[in-house]
Image (cartoon, helix red, strand yellow):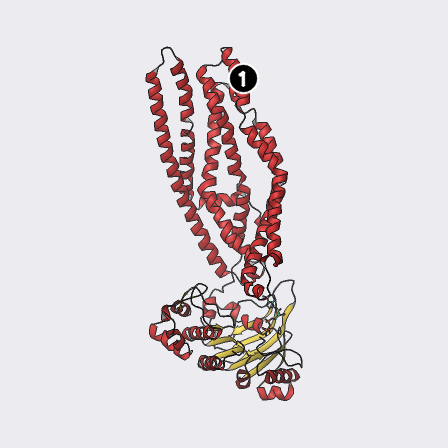
Amino acid sequence: MGPSESERPTLKGLTRLLAMEGRLVTAAALSATAAAALALVPFFVVARMATAIYATPPDLGTVRSLALVAAVALALRYVLVAGANVLAHVAAFRTLHALRLALAKKLGAVPLSFFGRRSAGELRKTLMDDVSQIEVFVAHHFPDAVAASVVPIATAIALLWIDWRMALASIAMAPLAVGAMAVAMRGAGAAHEQWNEIQSRTNRSLLEYLRGIQVIKTFGLSAQRFGELSRSIEEGLAWMEGFMRTNGRGYGAFGALIGSSLVVLVPLGGALYAGGTLSLDSFVLFLVLGPQLLMSLMRLMFAWGNVERIEAGNARIQAILAAPDLENAPGTARPAHDGIAFRGVGFRYDDDGPEVLHDVSFEVPAGKVTALVGPSGAGKTTLVRLVPRLWDTTSGAVELGGVDVRALPLDALLSRVSMVFQDVFLFHGTVRDNLRLARPDATDAEIDAACRAARAYDFIQALPQRYDTLLGERGARLSGGEKQRLSIARALLKDAPVLLLDEATAFADPENEARIQEALSELCAGRTVLVVAHRLSTVATADHIVVLDDGRVSDRGTHEELLARCALYQRLWKSHTDALDWSLGDTDEPPVAQEVA
Ligand SMILES: Nc1ncnc2c1ncn2[C@@H]1O[C@H](COP(=O)(O)OP(=O)(O)OP(=O)(O)O)[C@@H](O)[C@H]1O
């Protein structure tokens, strides 16, 4: 995706970026400039030496002094290059660190809808690639560009002062070279945008490919057949070939022309020298320094040539940083009790998408279990997500303890709510780390107690390093049921008065299932519970059941009341008892057991 109007790259953005470590960046640029200037000293020395050597008799004293000057200049140059490098890298890594921290903080603060509008591939590209480019820019391109701007100008002035005719001859090839570069760059801006777009697509498909690898393997699909990924890789290759075909010749001509100033300098200098209007040392100076002038010009073009790309990356970073945070209500509003109320709630995921909840109103009384049932896609999960503000309502309001959740400071809201969802995400870290997420100051005894209540203690004790066993992608693998129990332990540790539960469908293994049931009973006791119910026992024992159908409340009451009067509930119940699972196909056909409702 190209940058929008508001995030169009500006040089101002890069200047602000450089200003983050302004002093270090300036020092690095000054050192790099001084080093580049010192690199020219040997050329002047060689020119002067030519006269000293050809003098009769040869002036060996001057030659020795000049050699010493050249040696000192070179030594100093290396010190300055090293200094510039260190300064620029320190500045770059500090900038990088600050940007990454700011981005991580921002991603934690934006509402979930932010992620709905961007693909994971796009975000990954900005967070990894664009941020890394900034490092290269601050550490390399910027000091190089400054040195490459200052030194050719100083050299040009010096050469003009020594002999304007030869100075002009040194850059005679420049207009041709610039012309060739202009040909090479024709359409490059649009082409680069296209390149970025292909890269984003490749990133996105690669992530999808990795996430879906199990499905791909199950269906025997090879990478070649995994459409989008192979297509975008091939498109990348085609782009590169096409770009080289149309722009490669221009780049080649530029390189050849920029290195050919001697073609002009030698005959002209020879003629002027023979005519007696050019001294030998000036002639030699132009022969060695003239070509350098255009070479520096080339470095300059390359150094600044990167700016557009880096600006575009920086604009994408700044667009993320400028995204509005999830509004955190100021003040000290606190819920008066632990009951939840939905008042005329309407919701759509996208501004221009369909409304998935329509005018939903009901109450979840404090200290009671309220079950949400309904066919798949009715909006049960969506509704539950509105309570902790994972999303905000489009119309109407969700209240906790009589206060609109948007009017509660986020910490006041989130400290009162625990969530146990079907997909349990475990971070790379130990079992203990994963548990302590819920309450960082939990004591070992509290952790033990929570794990026992969640029926997780025994399997944790059986792990190779017990609580210190690593979990997550590169750690031990837990079964689905074990993960569920760990997440219940996490919720028990948090000990929040409101529990939002998206029940997993029954586990095949009855022993696992029974343990989860016990753990959940412990967790639900004495709390306000809103549960997306999939289990017979949960539904039958809930204090209150709300039937949701196509984003609307279709009926509510107790199990007996609904069974007596609600046709949809009767149908759901029948299919559930038929399948021995609360598997909610909105049909009379027996649904497949284990289907997630
Ligand atoms: N992130 C999302 N972006 C856009 N639409 C979504 C998103 N998540 C869910 N939906 C849509 O919202 C509607 C309600 O989905 P939801 O998951 O809340 O239903 P559900 O009743 O929980 O279904 P199930 O029991 O199958 O989980 C569906 O039409 C679904 O396609």
Quadrant of the picture in which ligand 1 is shown: bottom right
Residue 16 coordinates in the image, percent (x, y):
48, 45
Q: Residue placed at 47% from the left, 57% from the top?
A: 104
User: In the depicted view, which residue is nearer to us: 419 or 72?
Assistant: 72
Residue 18: % across, % down: 46, 44
Identify residue type, mark 1: Leu
Element assignment for label 1: helix
Towards the viewer: 460 or 403: 460
Residue identified by numbered label 1: 268
Q: Position of residue 237 (x, y in %)?
A: 60, 47
Q: Is residue 420 left or right of residue 461?
A: right
Residue 450 in the image: x percent, y percent? 39, 76
Does residue 365 appear in the picture of this structure? yes
At horizontal 59% and vertical 76% (from top left) the residue drawn is 595
Residue 474 lies left or right of residue 358; in this view the side is left
In the displayed structure, does residue 226 sit left or right of residue 69? Answer: right
Residue 142, above or below 555: above
**22 sits to left or right of 122:** left
Between residues 136 and 457, which one lies in front from this camera angle? 457
Residue 64 appears in which quarter of the rendering? top left
In the picture, residue 183 is in which quadrant?
A: top right
- Could you tell me which residue is drawn at 37 percent across and 77 percent down? 449
Visible residue check, residue 186: no
